[in-house]
Amino acid sequence: MTSIATLGYGTTLKWNDKTVIRLTKIGKVTPKVAKLDATTFGSSDYYKEYLPGMIDPGEVSIEGLFRPDDTEGQKAMYDDMNSREVREFIITFPSTIAATTWTGNAYIMDFAPGDITPENLIKVSMTLFITGKPTLAVTLSADISDMTGIEENAGASLTFVPAFAAATYTYETTVNTASDWIKLTVTQATAASITATALGTSYTLTSGVQSSQIAIDDADSVTEVVISEYDTGKAAKTYKIYVARPSA
């Protein structure tokens, strides 16, 4: 079974819209909510009570190979520390987990070239101290632009409820009790992959082309059909169709 784990290879850090080179570690962005003790003499059954307080955006530890010639990256960060500048940072995760970024504002709290020895690489470490709210953003694939379908019984067209709309992601439809499959035509011009999954079986779809037969469950049942589509380097977008097949 293939693991869904993702390597960190390919992650980048931009400081003031310039990529910092030769990095080997980018630490965690860790916003943390303060815990305020709201316990009173009237708190029930001797249990302490708490309320959430302000959120500390935290700090990010950075490590890499020391490159003072990186004038727009490492050297600029050192200069910004001395001038106490607050800058925008962007951490971009590997493309294997879609277009995901942390974006925020920070100042450089420390900058330290590492120990120098004859046989070891010269490293550098620095700390970004975040100020204000950082934003975790994921770029989603484009919406499906059109979706139609037919059922087995005389090739009748499916009626989606509600009517299909690109930004609506859940639908219901009812087929004749004699129908044990449906076919879908899904259109998403930029999709790298479109699949339909029903009753544990996946079907590969091509944008704008009618699918093969997608099996649905027996009479007096509802089958969930999941349509998943994604653009290269973006997070998948999912639509669901609940296909009701009434009893005879």
Image: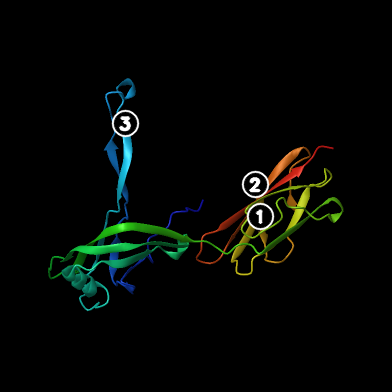
Of 235 and 105, nearer the camera is 105
Question: Counting residues from the N terminus, which is met first, the one under dot 2 or under dot 3?
Answer: 3
Amino acid at dot 1: Ala
Query: What amino acid type should be assigned to the residue bearing mark 2?
Result: Gly
Would you name the residue on which mark 3 appears? 49
**Badge 1 is on which residue?**
196
Residue 12: where, in percent of width, then height? 35, 67
Question: Do the residues under discs 1 and 2 have CB atoms within 8 angstroms?
Answer: no
Does 112 sit above or below residue 228?
Answer: below
- Element carrying mark 3: loop
Location of residue 147 by image quarter:
bottom right
Task: Give x and y (percent) for residue 109.
Answer: 19, 61
Check disc 2 and report the residue beneath it: 200
190 displayed left or right of 114: right
Q: Residue at x 53, y 67 (%)?
A: 232
- The single residue placed furthest to the right in the displayed view is 154
Which amino acid does the dot numbered 3 rest on? Glu
Q: Residue at x 30, y 53 (%)?
A: 57
* Disc on res. 153: none
Q: Nearer the viewer, mark 1 or mark 2?
A: 1
Can residue 25 be seen from the camera position used here? Answer: yes
Q: Position of residue 180 (x, y in %)?
A: 79, 47
